[in-house]
C-alpha cells in the first residue's frame, strides 16, 4: 500500500527481457541499503518487488500482466520514474490510499503552464471513467492528485510547483502515456452493490441504506 506521495525520481539504468516479462534496474534517489529483497516499491505507480540490490540501484521483475496494463514496457535506459516505498503502519497518510495496481493507461491531451501551476488534461479508458469524480483522488504515474473536472472520458488536474519539481509530471508532453490508478473505494462499493460495470445503478441514500452502508 502507498500514499501517492513520491519520495523521489529514479533513473532506469537497464532493461532486459526475461522468459516472461521484463527486468528493470533503477538508480535510486534514496540509499539502496534501506531496501531489502522482497520489498515493494511503486515504480511510475506500479507496485514492483525488489529482486536485486546494488550499491546505488535496485532491480525489479515486471510480469506480463503489468507490462500489458502499464507504460513500463516502453521504458528504456535514461528514462526517469517516480518512486515510493511502501507505506509503514504509523506513517501519515498525506495523499490517498494507493495500491500500486494500475488500472490502465491514459494519455496527456492538453497542458498549459500558468504563473503558479501546471494544468494537465488526460484522456482515460472508457471503462475507468465511472470511477473518476470531481474533487476525487487519482494516481498518475504514482502521484496522488485531486481531480479538478471530469467530462466524458477526460479529466483535468493542476500540478503545483513542489509536485512539478519532485516528480516526472512536469516533463510530460502532449501524447505521452501515463499509468492511472483510480480510487479503490469506488471499485469496492460497486462490487459490494453487486452491479456489473455495464449496469451500475445510481447511488442514492435509499440504496446505501438498503445495502447496510447507512
Image (cartoon, rainbow, N blue to C red):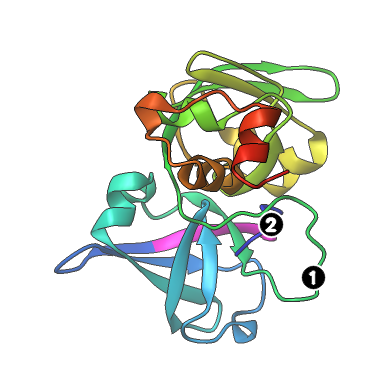
Locate residue 8: give its quadrant.
Answer: bottom right
Residue 96 shows in this picture: yes
Q: How many marks?
A: 2
Q: Picture quarter containing residue 5?
A: bottom right
Identify whether 165 is placed above or below 56.
above
The N terminus is located in which quarter? Answer: bottom right
- Could you tell which of marks 2 and 1 lies nearer the N-terminus? 2
Tell me, for residue 91, which label it has, or none.
1
Residue 125 showing in the rendered view: no
Element carrying mark 2: loop
Within 10 angstroms of label 1, few (less than 14), some, or many (20 or more) residues? few
Q: Main secondary structure of the magenta part?
A: strand
Q: Look at the numbered discs 2 and 1 and tell me whether their residues touch, using CB distance below 8 Å.
A: yes
Mark 2 — residue? 3
- Residue 77 magenta: no
In three-dimensional space, the C-alpha distance between marks 2 and 1, rounded to whole angstroms, equals: 10 Å
Of residues 126 and 23, the one nearer the viewer is 126
Of helix, strand and loop, which one carries label 1? loop
- Residue 173 image offset from top left, x and y in percent: 52, 25
Residue 195 placement, left or right of 213: left
**Residue drawn at (68%, 69%) of the image:** 87
Name the side, left or right, on which 115 lies relative to 172. right
Q: Which residues are magenta?
A: 6-13
- Up-down relation of residue 35 to residue 179 (above or below): below
Mark 2, other Cα within 10 Å: few <14 / some 14–19 / many ≥20: many
The extreme left residue here reads 19
The C terminus is located in which quarter? top right
x and y percentages locating residue 25 in the rendered image: 41, 68
Residue 8, magenta (yes or no): yes
Amino acid at each position: 500500500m502507498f500514499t501517492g506521495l513520491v519520495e523521489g525520481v529514479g533513473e532506469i539504468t537497464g532493461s532486459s527481457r526475461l522468459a516472461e516479462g521484463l527486468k528493470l534496474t533503477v538508480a535510486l534517489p534514496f540509499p539502496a541499503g534501506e531496501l531489502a529483497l522482497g520489498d515493494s516499491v511503486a515504480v511510475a505507480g506500479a507496485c514492483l518487488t525488489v529482486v536485486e540490490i546494488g550499491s546505488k540501484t535496485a532491480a525489479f521483475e515486471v510480469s506480463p500482466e503489468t507490462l500489458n496494463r502499464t507504460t513500463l514496457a516502453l521504458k528504456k535506459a535514461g528514462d526517469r520514474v517516480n518512486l515510493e516505498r511502501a507505506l509503514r503502519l504509523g506513517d501519515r497518510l498525506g495523499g490517498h490510499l494507493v495500491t500500486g495496481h494500475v488500472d490502465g493507461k491514459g494519455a496527456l491531451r492538453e497542458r498549459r503552464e500558468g504563473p503558479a501551476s501546471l494544468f494537465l488534461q488526460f484522456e482515460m479508458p472508457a471503462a475507468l471513467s465511472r470511477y473518476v469524480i470531481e474533487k476525487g483522488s487519482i494516481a498518475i504515474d504514482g502521484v496522488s492528485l485531486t481531480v479538478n473536472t471530469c467530462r466524458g472520458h477526460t479529466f483535468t488536474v493542476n500540478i503545483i510547483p513542489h509536485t512539478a519539481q519532485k516528480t516526472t509530471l512536469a516533463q510530460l508532453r502532449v501524447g505521452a502515456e501515463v499509468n492511472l490508478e483510480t480510487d479503490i473505494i469506488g471499485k469496492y462499493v460497486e462490487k459490494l452493490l453487486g452491479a456489473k460495470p455495464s449496469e451500475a445503478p445510481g447511488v442514492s441514500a435509499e440504496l446505501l441504506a438498503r445495502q447496510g452502508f447507512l
